[in-house]
Image (cartoon, rainbow, N blue to C red):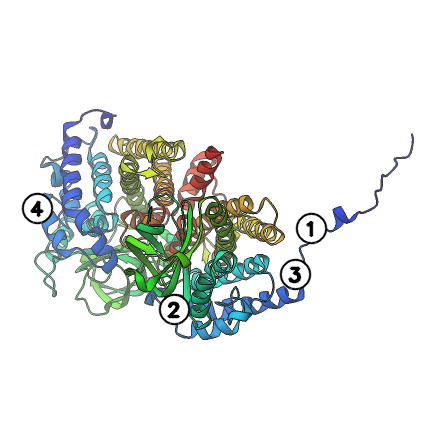
């Protein structure tokens, strides 16, 4: 018999550097810091913020020190961004924030899309208005007209908008809302509209609102793009927020199973800790498998955005589809593992089940969006 | 299987309670969900349509005005009436339905195991108004903080003291726990006897040592009250021991009887889950009929319509399972596996339909007070109470092989 010859191939850069899972020092530091913040502060605040339907007053000062709220605002305009924005770092952070509290995380992440969009496509006046507001500690929000319900008219060269915005988080407290609609990406200054603050069942601390616009005049300086450039810009903004949502959803799913696992270790029924029943091991395992995949899909989408890969938009959308499924399933199953205790709000998981919904519903049904995009060809 | 045909009695129940659900329950559902309050006025009004708090003691007569055929070999109709009624009421609002029917959890063991005197005492305890001017209601106290799915490990004890029993222990997740005027409490009378030693007692609210505990804030079914109840050396006369002094593990009294009772109510619990699923499905269908996506009718999209078709299939399957289990019960057939199958399937359907309906409705469903969001929260309990989904599968598995898988 001839000896088997092992083929060896020199490792080329193409194969060895295409995939890199290690964090750089700055990312490592950010993840550690945000993880501590999420586990200690956000989880500590979550139940009260949920009951009150409002964030704790300390949230803003503590999170600002950690670099939230102004991380996407250029340093020259009072923010922290010096150089290109890292969506990968944001996804790493979003996962940890999601583990802490989805409602508070929504506030901590809300400024990113408006700040980056204004920096990329905004007029000098729009940049000045939005950056000044954010640098002063303000909030901005994002709305997506996913079903084409907004009416856009051009009157004398000026954009007029009618229809309903939201429900979306942070709108109740925002100075501006970035709106991605058919053929237009624009800002609405909230002092020019009437908002209805609401407190939904999930992300209750998220300062939600709806707003009904009636032939709202959008000043030319607040229009970021129209026509084909607007469609491209909106797609880019949506890839950012979808990636962030996916990362946060993976965090919520992970947190749900962390709580459930701790409970199942101590709870004894039929003479054994319930966490040792195969059926519950399966629930936990499937949830964590899904959450791991969702986290990696979010990180891949973020990396694709950061590197300008053509697949970024699709990757972000797929990450969001999967993460939405995962967080819905994982939180329902965490309540199941807690049994009767899962159904009452002395324990953390019923809140997570309420929180899960927004990850699928916000900014539109992701699967429907994909179907429509595929048919539009 | 007369549920498939126009059985006039079941049609009548369906129509009457369907109308009650639409006209009386739906308008109140969101308010009581948001306020976490009991629908006391409606509970009083419901007595007029046969839903009195002691209705279970009256059997079939309560809804149909006709008594069961006393011949024990003839099929009954109770279980089928219960599933038809339960679906309609839960379609209106599962929380309110449970508030309307909460007392039946206590009335069932009284009806099944109680002596004529105990039935009389139970009726007496529920006559008139309570201190708040509300109608009087009852609670059954079985679950305990450490005893959820595994009801054999009850810690609450009852020890004899002359012609009295002294009850001590705490109960958890008790429907009507805070507001009840009468309680049926399960306690261990003879630890050496294990399950056979667990017996039920009828206890009046004003008995010293009976202390209602904290009312729970719940994810769903918020119009129904759930609370802890503490029994601190509560003295109960032995006349109020269900099944009588020698009940033991015999035909009346004891935990075995309670488990049979849970088997018997499972189809109706499943039917409630079907009612929630149907409510969400119908709501979505209505929106889809009039809705548009980027100018095209929602109903023209397979993405949406095939999901509705899937929901339709699952709801139909759940309802058939529930009806089969009820039909078997009425025909005196062993329906343990079928009842568990129906309950677990219906619970899954209710969760699936409400969850997907929320996604398809988009951001609108996130608005406070949105009915589908409420139904999503209400649906979850059906996979937990009256035997979790895992317990139902365990029961089914045991029927398949005779073994309890762990």
Task: Report whether residue A52 is seen.
Answer: yes
Looking at marks 2 and 1 on the same chain, the residue that comes earlier in the sequence is marked by 1
Identify the image quadrant of residue B154.
bottom left
Report which residue position mark 2 lands on.
A55
Write down the chain letter for disc 4.
Answer: B
The tag on residue B48 is 4
Write down the chain letter for disc 3.
Answer: A
The tag on residue A23 is 3
Which class describes the residues within 10 Å of circle 1: few (<14), some (14-19), or many (20+)?
few
The N terminus of chain B, quarter of image: top left
Question: Is the residue at mark 2 from the same chain as the one at mark 1?
Answer: yes
For the residues labelled 1 and 4, the Cα–Cα distance comes to 71 Å
Which class describes the residues within 10 Å of circle 4: few (<14), some (14-19), or many (20+)?
few
The tag on residue A19 is 1
For the residues labelled 4 and 3, the Cα–Cα distance comes to 69 Å
Give the secondary structure at mark 2: loop
């Amino acid at each position: 018999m001839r000896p088997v010859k092992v083929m060896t191939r020199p490792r080329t850069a193409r194969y060895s550097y295409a995939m890199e899972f290690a964090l750089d020092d700055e990312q490592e530091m950010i993840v550690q810091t945000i993880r501590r913040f999420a586990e200690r502060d956000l989880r500590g605040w979550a139940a009260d913020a949920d009951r009150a339907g409002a964030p704790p007053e300390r949230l803003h000062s503590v999170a600002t020190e950690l670099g939230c709220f102004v991380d996407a605002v250029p340093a020259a305009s009072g923010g922290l961004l010096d150089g290109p924005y890292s969506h990968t770092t944001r996804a790493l952070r979003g996962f940890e924030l999601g583990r802490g509290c989805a409602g508070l995380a929504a506030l901590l992440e809300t400024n990113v899309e408006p700040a980056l969009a204004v920096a990329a496509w905004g007029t000098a006046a729009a940049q000045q208005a939005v950056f000044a507001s954010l640098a002063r500690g303000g909030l901005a929000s994002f709305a997506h007209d996913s079903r084409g319900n907004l009416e856009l008219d051009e009157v004398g060269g000026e954009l007029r908008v009618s229809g309903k915005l939201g429900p979306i988080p942070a709108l109740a407290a925002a100075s501006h809302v970035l709106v991605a609609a058919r053929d237009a990406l624009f800002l609405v200054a909230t002092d020019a509209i009437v908002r209805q603050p609401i407190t939904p069942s999930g992300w209750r601390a998220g300062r939600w609102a709806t707003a009904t616009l009636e032939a709202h005049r959008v000043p030319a300086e607040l229009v970021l793009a129209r026509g084909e450039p607007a469609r491209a810009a909106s797609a880019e903004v949506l890839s950012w927020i979808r990636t962030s949502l996916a990362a946060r959803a993976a965090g919520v799913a992970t947190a749900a199973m962390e709580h459930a696992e701790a409970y199942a270790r101590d709870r004894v029924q039929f003479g054994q800790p319930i966490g040792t029943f195969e059926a519950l091991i399966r629930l936990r395992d499937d949830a964590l498998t899904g959450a791991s995949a969702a986290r990696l899909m979010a990180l891949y989408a973020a990396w694709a955005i950061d590197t300008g890969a053509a697949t970024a938009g699709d990757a972000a959308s797929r990450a969001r589809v999967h993460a939405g499924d995962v967080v819905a399933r994982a939180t329902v199953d965490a309540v199941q593992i807690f049994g009767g205790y899962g159904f009452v709000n002395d324990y953390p998981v019923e809140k997570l089940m309420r929180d899960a919904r927004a990850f699928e519903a916000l900014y539109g049904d992701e699967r429907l969006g994909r179907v429509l995009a595929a048919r539009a060809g | 299987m007369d549920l498939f045909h126009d059985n006039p009695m079941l049609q009548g129940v369906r129509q009457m309670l369907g109308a009650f659900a639409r006209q009386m329950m739906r308008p109140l559902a969101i308010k009581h969900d948001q306020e976490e309050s009991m629908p006391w006025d409606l509970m009083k009004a419901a007595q007029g349509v046969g839903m009195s708090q002691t209705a279970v003691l009256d059997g079939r007569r309560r809804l149909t005005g006709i008594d069961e055929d006393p011949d024990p070999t003839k099929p009954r109709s109770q279980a089928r009436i219960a599933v038809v009624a339960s679906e309609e009421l839960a379609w209106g609002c599962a929380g309110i339905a449970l508030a309307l029917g909460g007392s039946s959890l206590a009335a069932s063991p009284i009806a099944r195991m109680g002596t004529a005197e105990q039935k009389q005492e139970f009726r007496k305890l529920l006559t008139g108004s309570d201190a708040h001017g509300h109608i009087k209601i009852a609670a059954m106290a079985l679950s305990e903080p450490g005893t959820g799915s595994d009801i054999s490990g009850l810690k609450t004890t009852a020890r004899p003291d002359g012609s009295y029993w002294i009850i001590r222990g705490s109960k958890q997740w008790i429907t009507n726990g805070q507001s009840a005027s009468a309680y049926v409490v399960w306690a261990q009378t003879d630890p050496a006897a294990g399950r056979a030693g667990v017996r039920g007692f009828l206890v009046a609210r004003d008995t010293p040592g009976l202390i209602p505990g904290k009312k729970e804030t719940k994810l769903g079914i918020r119009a129904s009250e759930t609370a802890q109840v503490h029994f601190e050396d509560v003295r109960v006369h032995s006349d109020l021991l269900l099944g009588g002094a020698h009940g033991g593990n015999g035909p009346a009294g004891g935990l075995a009887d309670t488990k049979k009772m849970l088997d018997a109510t499972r189809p109706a619990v499943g039917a409630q889950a079907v009612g929630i699923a149907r409510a969400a499905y119908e709501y979505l269908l209505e929106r889809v009929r009039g809705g548009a996506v980027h100018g095209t009718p929602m109903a023209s999209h397979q993405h949406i319509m095939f999901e509705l078709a899937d929901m339709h299939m699952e709801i139909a399957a759940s309802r058939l399972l529930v009806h089969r289990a009820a039909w078997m019960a009425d025909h005196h057939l062993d329906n343990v596996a079928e009842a568990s199958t129906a309950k677990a399937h219906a619970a899954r359907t209710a969760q699936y339909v409400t969850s997907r309906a929320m996604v398809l409705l988009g951001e609108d469903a996130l608005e406070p007070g949105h009915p589908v969001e409420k139904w999503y929260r209400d649906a979850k309990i059906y996979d937990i109470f009256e035997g979790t989904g895992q317990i139902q599968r365990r029961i089914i598995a045991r029927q398949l092989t005779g073994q309890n898988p762990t």
